[in-house]
Image (cartoon, grey):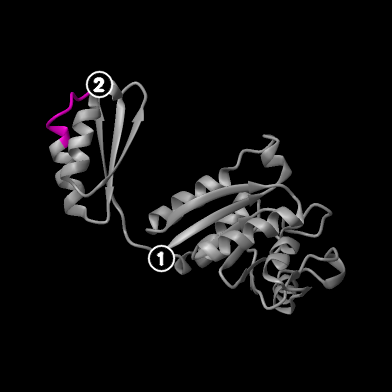
Amino acid sequence: MKVAVVTVGNELLAGRTTDTNATWLCKRLDDRGVVVDRVTTVPDRIADIARVVNEYRAEYDAVIVTGGLGPTHDDLTMDGVAAALGRSLEEHEAALAWLEEDGYSRDDLASGTTTLPAGARALHNEDGVAPGAAIENVYILPGVPSEMKTMFEAIAHEFEGTPTYRETVVAAEPESALLERIADLREGFDVAVGCYPGESVRIELESADEDAVEAAATWLRERVEPP
């Protein structure tokens, strides 16, 4: 399963808010064996949201969009997704019923709070007010991290991929000195290899084949200088 993550917000692009949602989602999806191929941040503009969602929904198994939910002037994510899918926006009775069960009346809610793309499945916001939505292969989650995390966990079972196994080998050598051994590793083992330099070099080995990862890690550890 391949997924794209889209985060929405002018404040993210201006650097006023750190995009922790994308990092958290990527980790949770990776834990479930799902490949995240794109992480994209777009401004609070309907046209930008619609263009990116429309492109990604055709290319990936699912698109997860976070941020821009609610009734204020810059909460435009539902509008953008509706435009991408060619849907109108309409009040969602199930979402309204959930909020009424939570103690809100229609009069308490700002206009647009429960407005979702036509035909969407409402996703209940256990930690907030603005509902999320799922429509076709697009999932729309809140931008508030606590709300986003709770909502994702409720639908996490819908994201299943192939389990991936990893081993990390740390070498107290310059990355440039390891190039020949890493080339031999790539040639001899069917694993993906990533090198991350720092005080030491962290070499991460990854594959859907657990035995291949363990064999590659053993081979490499015997050939590098440990820290």
Q: Secondary structure at mark 1?
A: loop
- Drawn side of residue 24 relative to residue 170, left or right: right
Q: Which residue is mark 2?
A: 173
In the image, residue 75 sits, relative to residue 197, either above or below, namely: below
Q: Position of residue 53 (x, y in %)?
A: 63, 60
Q: Residues within 10 Å of mark 2 (few under 14, many from 20)?
A: some
Q: Amino acid at mark 1?
A: Glu
Q: Amino acid at mark 2?
A: Glu
Q: Which residue is mark 1?
A: 160
Residue drawn at x 82%, y 71% is 105
Q: Is-magenta flag for residue 221?
A: yes
Report the span colored magenta. Answer: 220-227
Res 150 label: none
Q: Secondary structure at mark 2?
A: loop
Mark positioned earlier in the residue sequence (2 or 1)? 1
Callout in the foreground (2, 1) = 2
> Which quarter shows the N terminus?
bottom left
Q: Assign the magenta stretch its main secondary structure.
A: loop
Image quadrant assignment for residue 71: bottom right
- Drawn side of residue 97 relative to residue 72, left or right: left
Q: Which residue is nearer to you in this view: 106 or 67?
A: 67
Q: Position of residue 97 (x, y in %)?
A: 73, 77
Residue drawn at x 14%, y 29% is 223
Q: Could you tell me how far apart the alpha carbons at marks 2 and 1 are, in whole angstroms?
A: 38 Å
Q: Position of residue 20 (x, y in %)?
A: 57, 43
Residue drawn at x 61%, y 50% is 145
- Drawn side of residue 107 relative to residue 56, left or right: right
Total of numbered circles in the picture?
A: 2
Q: Which residue is nearer to you in this view: 104 or 80?
A: 80
In the image, residue 181 sits, relative to residue 162, either above or below, namely: above
Q: Residues within 10 Å of mark 1 (few under 14, many from 20)?
A: some
> Which quarter shows the C terminus?
top left
